[in-house]
Amino acid sequence: MEDRELEWDEYLTLSREGQGLYSEKGSKFIGYAFPIRNEEDLKGRLEELRKEHHKARHHCFALRIHPEDPYQRANDDGEPGHSAGTPILHQILSHQLMNVGIVVVRYFGGTKLGVSGLIRAYGDAAREAISNSLIVKEFLLDPIELTFGYPQMNEVMRIVSDFGLIIENQEHTEICRYSFGVRRSIKAKLLERVASLRSVDVTN
């Protein structure tokens, strides 16, 4: 897969769970690829899959999280070293994915595949799971809150439109408070634009 050109504050992840299947010599490998934010998310889904596939011999996984300070982990769950978790992780890396977990469940078919066969099987199941999900682009965001009076509403909404901001929270009382997650590469320009307005306070 060709590398995608990403800006410094962009990363790729999955928008939904995808499943993949690989079979060889009676063994069945079922892959599950899904978006996560932390290891607890992976542990929760892994526990669900262990219950769902309680007769399976292995539940191998890999994850990659924290776009600002990447952390990755792979687990072979009893398979020969680096024959399961590592090829799963390789698929995450080759697709340039972040905040993603993949679990591959194996039902043993009675015939050993060898290390090379396992590497191919776990990798292919993981790749199929990714291909059956949807890869999306996300951004590193910083929180910003604007506080202003009703006379400034039109000017603030013009900024919202010009910068493509999504209002996460809003409050309308005697004053208005709007909260956003602002992409880091446009943050400086946004703050400069806000500074040119009268009676609009910013918290970041």
Image (tube, rainbow, N blue to C red):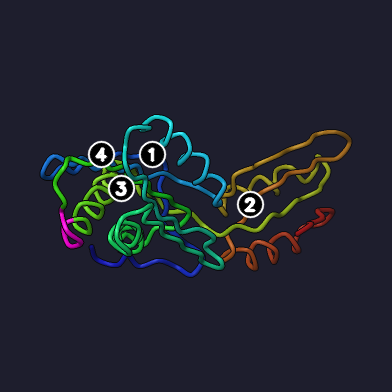
The amino acid on which the numbered mark 2 sits, given as a three-letter code, is Gly
Residue 17: which numbered mark, if any? 1
- Marks 3 and 1, how far apart at CA: 8 Å
Crowding around mark 1 (Cα neighbors within 10 Å: few <14, some 14 to 19, many 20+) is some
Is there CB contact under 8 Å for labels 3 and 1? Answer: no
Please state, as top left, top right, bottom left or bottom right, where the N terminus lies in the image: bottom left
Per the image, the residue denoted by label 2 is 181
Q: Residues within 10 Å of mark 4 (few under 14, many from 20)?
A: some
Mark 2, Cα crowd under 10 Å, few <14 / some 14-19 / many 20+, is some
* Count of numbered tags: 4
Q: CA distance from mark 1 to mark 2?
A: 25 Å
Report if residue 105 lies within the magenta region: no
Q: Earlier in the sequence, mark 2 or mark 4?
A: 4
Image quadrant where residue 118 sits? bottom left
Q: What residue type is disc 3 on?
A: Ile
User: From the viewer's perspective, is residue 96 above or below residue 100?
Assistant: below
Q: Which residue is mark 3?
A: 130
Contact, mark 4 vs mark 3 (Cβ under 8 Å) = no
Per the rendering, the mark at residue 110 is none
In the rendered view, tell whether residue 109 sits above or below residue 159: above
Amino acid type, callout 1: Glu
Chain part drawn in magenta:
113-117
Residue at (43%, 50%) from the top-left corner? 101
Please name the residue that numbered disc 4 is placed on. Answer: 107
Q: Front-most of 181 and 200?
A: 181
Label 1 or label 2, whichever comes before in sequence order? 1
Q: Residue furthest left?
A: 25
Which circle, 1 or 4, is nearer the viewer? 4
In the image, which is nearer the foreground, mark 2 or mark 3?
3
Marks 4/3: CA–CA distance: 20 Å
Rendered location of residue 145, percent (x, y): 75, 51
